[in-house]
Structures are given as C-alpha cells and as structure tokens.
Amino acid sequence: MKKITDETLNDYIDGRLSIKKLNEIENALKNDEELLERLRALQTVNKELRLLKTESAPFGITEKIMNKISARTKSKQRSFFVASVSAMGLLLAAALGILIYFGQNKGSDKVIFGEIFSFIKKRVPINFSFVKNFTISNDAIIAIAGFSLLLLIFFYFLLDSHKMFKDELNRFTT
C-alpha cells in the first residue's frame, strides 16, 4: 500500500474520495496509530479554519489592484523606451567619436573614410571599396551628428506624447 499523504487525508475529511479509496483509508486507520494521529490533527485544523470569521474584500479592490499592475507595466515599458533611446544616442556618439578619431588626416580638417574603413576592414571581412575616397569635414560630421541627435530627441517626445494620448483615450473608453 502506498503511503497516505496529508492531501489524501484532507480529501477523506472533505468527503472527496472514491469508495475504493475511502475503504483503503479506513483500513489503514485501523492498523496505523500514527496515521490516525495525523488525521486527528488535520481534522482539528479543518475545524478551526471553518470557525474563522471571513470578511469580504472592499468594493472595487480588483480594479484598484489591476490598475496598479497596469501602471507598473507601463512604467517598465516607458523605462525600456528611455533606455533604448539613450542607448541609440550613446551609439551615435560612439560612432561619431570613432569617425573623428580614426579618420583624422594629419594636417587637415578632413576625415578620410577610406582610412576608417581600411581599419575596420582588417577586422571585419566586408568590401568597403565604394567609400574609399569619400571625404567630409569634421564640422560637417559634427553638424550631422547634432542633427541626428535632435531627430532622436524629437522622435522620443513624439512617441511619448503619442503614448500619453493613447492612455488618455483608453481611460475615456474604459
């Protein structure tokens, strides 16, 4: 015979056993004093639990809890969005720094992309021959980087205001 668990004894107390299982438990209880003690302890706990006074939850508690969960989820999504935009800004700044640092032509204010790509080509097997002689000044690179940063900030605020609008719209429709 298998060992009788507390779960099975609780089912016995609640009357949720088949007749076959019920007879097995009753036979085991006649022969096993330890099992009988466990049953009595569980019956005592069951009796005390049934005597406890229960109170109903306050009205609207489910909605309040769900709203808090929803607010936390939105906060995490917004944090992820801010982190993504920040990472893109850092990547843009790093790319600009790499372009300026490795592309400096001695004695000139021109950045020669051929030198940059030859440096990268040594480490990455990609054909960069189409940009070998392309040159641009450092001032133009800084202007392009600044414009890119402004676009990045603009799109961040555009998307953020769109999210706030959707939240307001959802609040009115629900």
Image (cartoon, helix red, strand yellow):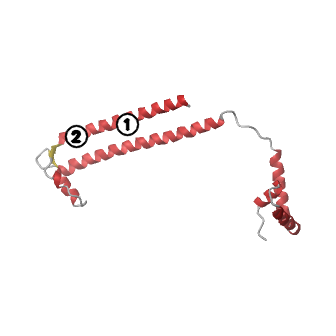
Circle number at residue 142: 2
Horizontally, is 119 left or right of 61 in the view? left
Q: Pick the quarter of the image with the N terminus.
A: bottom right
Q: Secondary structure at mark 1?
A: helix
* Structural crowding at the residue carrying mark 1, measured as other residues with C-alpha within 10 Å and reported as few (<14), some (14–19) or many (≥20): some
Which circle's residue, 2 or 1, is located before the other in the chain? Answer: 2
Q: Quadrant of residue 9?
A: bottom right
At label 2, which amino acid type do we have? Ile
Query: Which residue in the rendered view is the most extreme toward the bottom?
Result: 1
Q: Residue at x 89, y 67 (%)?
A: 30
Figure check: 121 above or below 57:
below
Figure check: 23 above or below 92:
below
Figure check: 151 above or below 27:
above
Q: Pick the quarter of the image with the C terminus.
A: top right
Horizontally, is 137 left or right of 156 in the view? left
x and y percentages locating residue 37 in the rendered image = 85, 62
At label 1, which amino acid type do we have? Tyr
Q: Residue at x 82, y 47 (%)?
A: 50
Q: Secondary structure at mark 2?
A: helix
Q: Quadrant of residue 41?
A: bottom right
x and y percentages locating residue 81 in the rendered image = 42, 41
Circle number at residue 156: 1
Query: Which residue in the rendered view is the most extreme toward the right?
Result: 30
Q: Residue at x 81, y 52 (%)?
A: 45
Circle number at residue 121: none
Horizontally, is 7 left or right of 105 in the view? right
Query: Which residue in the rendered view is the most extreme toward the top?
Result: 172
Which of label 2 and label 1 is nearer to you?
1
x and y percentages locating residue 113 in the rendered image = 17, 50
